[in-house]
Amino acid sequence: MKALSILLTLAPFFLNGAGVDPIDYIKGRVIDAETKKPIPYANILIQKTGIGTSTDSNGNFFLRGIPEEEFIIFVSHIGYKSIEKRIGIKGRDKELYVYLYPVLLRIPDAFLVTASKGTFGEFDSPVPVSIIRKKDIDNTSNQLITNVMKDIPSVSIVGTGYHGSPSIRGLARKRVAVLVDGEKLNSMRNTGPPGTFVDVSNIKRIEVVRGPYSTLYGSDAIGGVVNILTEGYSSSCPGKLNVSYKSVNKGYDVISTISRTFDKLQIYLNAGKRNGKSYKDSRGTPVSNTFFDEQHIITKLHYNIKRNQHLRIKWWLSDGRNIGKPAFDTLTNAMHNIDLHNILGVKYIWREVHPIIPRMVFHISYHYHNLGVDIKKHKVEDNPDEDKLVNNNKNIKDDTYTIEGESHFLLWKNLKILTGVNGYLRENVHIDEDKIIRNYNTGAFIREMKTEPIPYAYQRNYAMFLQSTYLPIKKVIINSGVRFDGVYTGMKDTTNTMFNVYNQAISGNVGLTYNVKTELNITANVGQAFRAPAIKELFLTTQTPGGLNIANRDLKPERSLNMDFGVRYKGNSTAISVSIFRNSILDMIILDWNNSTPMREGTFRNIGRALLYGGEIASKFHISKRWKMEFNLSRIYGYDVKKKEVLRDIPPFKANGNIQYISNRLRISLSGHYSGRKTDVPENDFPCEPFYTFDISSSLRLNHRVIFSASVTNLFNKNHRECYQFEWMRAPGRSFNVGLKVKFNTKQGG
């Protein structure tokens, strides 16, 4: 290994005349000496002065008020050798470049994980983190986020198509916090928030934290966190057009982007449309209710108030129409006739607030969601002439406000602290229902019923948290945190009677990373998480395509205690990680189905304790400069401890692998996926057979402006069903997909 060293470059020049001007500031950049990439959020201190700061996301820093011509600068960053160096500055040139060599880790393309709010990096994370980068997303013709995440260990998809939601380590159904640019989403759906209104071509990267993280995100993070980071202003690509087509559902995307800068103002505009018919299975049969139609427009403004103060404004409008919703039986047909997201957010970032406060962030946003559900059900009677057609149209509206304030503290050279408060306020939840009943055979009108199952409801989550990263000795990183949440949930019924439920929880985590060598570390983490019962689970008894959902006002919050242990190796050409986990969930909330009733009924209730455990192995190999391989496998077990029964939604043994050829212009990938047999299932669930599929994808850079991509998914047209779908619902058959990405120009205009 190279000897650790620091290269400091200063370019002095001399004054005209006798004396030297006072030194009021210095600016510079901190750079990785091996990769030559900037190092974000490195700590800068001028000793014996109390003056300090941290670098921004591009590795730049700025210090004002330097009192002397000579001083000692201290530069540190987790994973690099800290340095102390006496600096002498003459004249007016105050540009300083600091080169740091890695000492604790060696990670190609490493960066801080934003889902952890910058408290740890990808390699030194105490819990497993998977990152899907844009270059891997662009190599495919995927049109939905769920298809992008299927290769991550222990990640499965519950639900299909446009409304598929992620499951992590066997935990789905509102137990995975889904974020868009760090902002948590909510949903009335049993499967949880899908996040699929974000178009794949608009994604910069996806971060998946496998394991509970309520310390930062409160309720709904028992399973883990999915943070979808979207693109913004880019000087290297002022405009582009993305077009793609998928044969299995005749689906297409057309997305256009413009990015410009005007003095202190940067503007990003994105608009597009996505459409897909019901996809076809391996036999060429359309799988009903898997169609979707969505159009959106996004505006992002970044205004530099001062050198160290920034204002970011975003507006996001996604208008989904005619989105299929698969039902439990073939007598039911359902769709979302509207899925509207209207998001407005403002973020203020203030750097170098004080020598010990390198960064503060204030954020407020408003999210209006309107979800319409149209359910048509053939109700069979004893006399076939009396069969009924029940058309049930529901409309769900809510306003969500996010208010956050957080500060980063640098108390000592080896201790970083993040603390803050936030409010996640879901207000004005309203559901109205219009039910029209007709004779199924003649179409004759029978009766109409209009109701308001929820005239008004709310769920308000207030919290304060503290997270710290500490290096007590050279090879050890301790990441720990604590959070207090108060969750107020209430509903007013049609008689104006108000029902209120209050839950409070303390979450915490302690994680340890021990760097045995530069390339090898051992991690351990203990985390406590919780999930408050949702409005629907507490108050709303309603008919859904899956059956009748019966609410329960006596539900208790879920409380989880998770233990993680991992070993990671990451060299220049090889990366291998092994992790095992055990997650014990007290008062887990389940939807207990009863198929013996005339109408399939499911009641929300707590079970005493659920236990989930398992493990993951993931590996990457750079065989040569042009060839790369990846492979991972995962196995999860989940039980109701009291009943000694397996839990629903627990995936079987899974394995994923791919081999890639990469050159300057051409990228080819062959991927394989295997899902094992699952016959040990809970009552009213369905066993599933093993299956394997293969996909092949490629992208060709025709010139510096045009990239063409083509892929074939389910190459051998295998007939299969994912274990988390209805018994009749088969996965898509073979599909031929193409895409075209065109940059308008490569030079930034004025």
Image (cartoon, grey):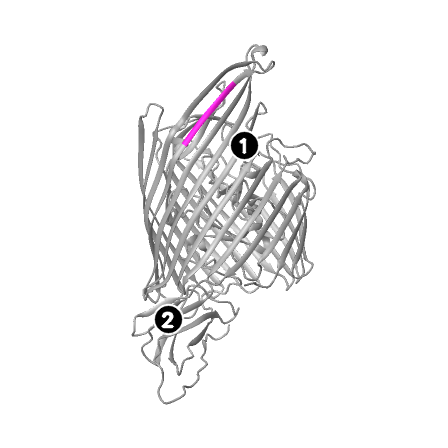
Structural distance between the alpha carbons of marks 1 and 2: 55 Å
Amino acid type at image mark 2: Leu
> Does residue 75 lie above or below 145 as drawn?
below
Sequence order check: which comes first, mark 1 or mark 2? 2
Q: Position of residue 703 (x, y in %)?
A: 68, 61
Q: Which mark is residue 63?
A: 2
Q: Nearer the viewer, residue 210 or 10?
A: 10
Q: Is residue 140 visible?
A: no
Task: Say which residue appears at 43% left-offset and 42% top-offset.
Answer: 367
Quadrant of the rendered image containing residue 663: bottom right
Q: Nearer the viewer, residue 653 or 499?
A: 499
The region drawn magenta spans 430-436
Q: Is residue 435 magenta?
A: yes
Numbered badge on residue 337: 1
Q: Are marks 1 and 2 in contact (CB under 8 Å)?
A: no
Q: Position of residue 409 (x, y in %)?
A: 33, 61
| Image spot of residue 139 (x, y percent) | 63, 53
Q: Amino acid at mark 1?
A: Asn
Against 107, residue 391 (above or below) is: above
Residue 456, placed above or below residue 245:
above
